[in-house]
């Protein structure tokens, strides 16, 4: 079945530590790929997106993501996590222009001092 | 305003009551999407408008859900005879709808949290 999966429901990291959030998709063709962040009571904010070309994409707030076609993955990374990064992170896809966004189930990130 | 505005932010309804949720998209945005986000889950698509035309309503869970965008700007999501399973955050998003997704972005509102008692 076509889907977006995020294997980790919840992750806890120490402030200053590195972070990697996993995302896999199962679609016949490579979709457009996104990462969104949602803080409590806030709307979804786009962190970064991938369409084609360079497989390492840079986003806002120091985040980056790497697209690996062979693994159907689009993992989000950050070298050093800040306490303000605690939030819910959603991997998402769009299959075409003028199309809805399909979200994964989300990974909740907690940051400890 | 500068962003997508949704009202009310919170709505408590008694089971069986009708509710109306409003979305003010960013001015000039052609596309408008509604999503439903249940607790602990990712948002799920409900319906899509291009200007005033509702082009996709495949995600609406039942005929109790109805959405409109009569003048191609503000949109209202109406839920009739609310049930407890309708409790969720309802998110609205808008975009310019450019063919090139490298520059087209969906901007999300903060959502309306609906609690049905």
Image: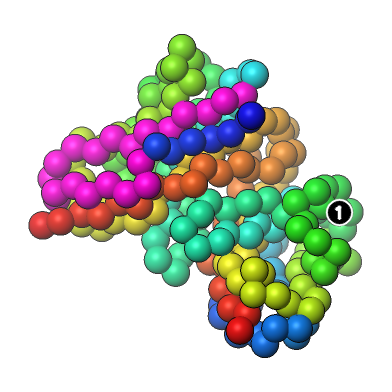
**In the shown orientation, is residue A14 left or right of residue B30?**
left
Q: Quadrant of the C terminus of chain B?
A: bottom right
**What are the residue bounds of the magenta stretch?**
A8-27
Magenta span contains residue A31? no
Q: Is residue B66 above or below residue B45?
A: below
The residue that appears at 76% across and 69% down in the rendered structure is: B77
The residue that appears at 37% across and 47% down in the rendered structure is: A9
The residue that appears at 80% across and 48% down in the rendered structure is: B58
Tally of marks: 1
Q: Position of residue A76 (x, y in %)?
A: 36, 34
Residue A103, quarter of picture: top right
Residue B102 seen in render: no
Closer to us: A90 or B117: B117
Residue A27 seen in render: yes
Which residue reaches farthest top? A70
Q: Position of residue B38 (x, y in %)?
A: 56, 61
Q: Position of residue B3 (x, y in %)?
A: 57, 63
Q: Position of residue B28 (x, y in %)?
A: 73, 56
Q: Is residue B45 above or below residue A31?
A: below
Q: Quadrant of the N terminus of chain B?
A: bottom right
Q: Secondary structure at mark 1?
A: strand
Magenta span contains residue A16? yes
Q: Chain of mark 1?
A: B
**In the shown orientation, is residue A107 left or right of residue B93?**
left
Residue A18, quarter of picture: top left
**Alpha-carbon neighbours of circle 1 within 10 Å: few (<14), some, or many (≥20)?**
some
The residue that appears at 70% across and 30% down in the rendered structure is: A96
Q: Which residue is under mark 1?
A: B54
Residue A28, quarter of picture: top right
């Amino acid at each position: 079945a076509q889907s977006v999966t995020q294997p980790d429901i919840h992750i806890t990291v120490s402030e200053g530590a590195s972070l990697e959030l996993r995302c896999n998709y199962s679609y016949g063709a490579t979709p457009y790929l996104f990462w969104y962040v949602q803080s409590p009571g806030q709307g979804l904010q786009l962190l970064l997106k991938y369409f084609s070309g360079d497989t390492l994409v840079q986003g806002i707030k120091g985040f980056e993501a790497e697209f690996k076609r062979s693994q159907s993955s689009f993992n989000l990374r950050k070298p050093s996590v800040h306490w303000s990064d605690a939030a819910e992170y959603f991997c998402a896809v769009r299959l075409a222009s003028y199309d809805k966004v399909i979200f994964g189930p989300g990974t909740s990130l907690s940051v400890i001092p | 305003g500068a962003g997508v505005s949704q009202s009310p932010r919170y709505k408590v309804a008694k089971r069986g009551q009708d509710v109306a949720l409003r979305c003010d998209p960013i001015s000039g945005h052609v596309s408008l999407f509604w999503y439903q986000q249940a607790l602990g889950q990712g948002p799920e698509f409900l319906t899509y408008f291009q200007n005033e035309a509702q082009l996709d309503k495949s995600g609406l869970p039942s005929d109790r859900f109805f959405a409109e965008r009569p003048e191609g700007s503000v949109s209202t999501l109406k839920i009739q005879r609310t049930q407890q399973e309708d409790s969720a955050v309802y998110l609205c998003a808008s975009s310019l709808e450019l063919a090139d997704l490298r520059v087209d972005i969906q901007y999300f509102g903060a959502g309306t949290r609906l609690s049905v008692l």
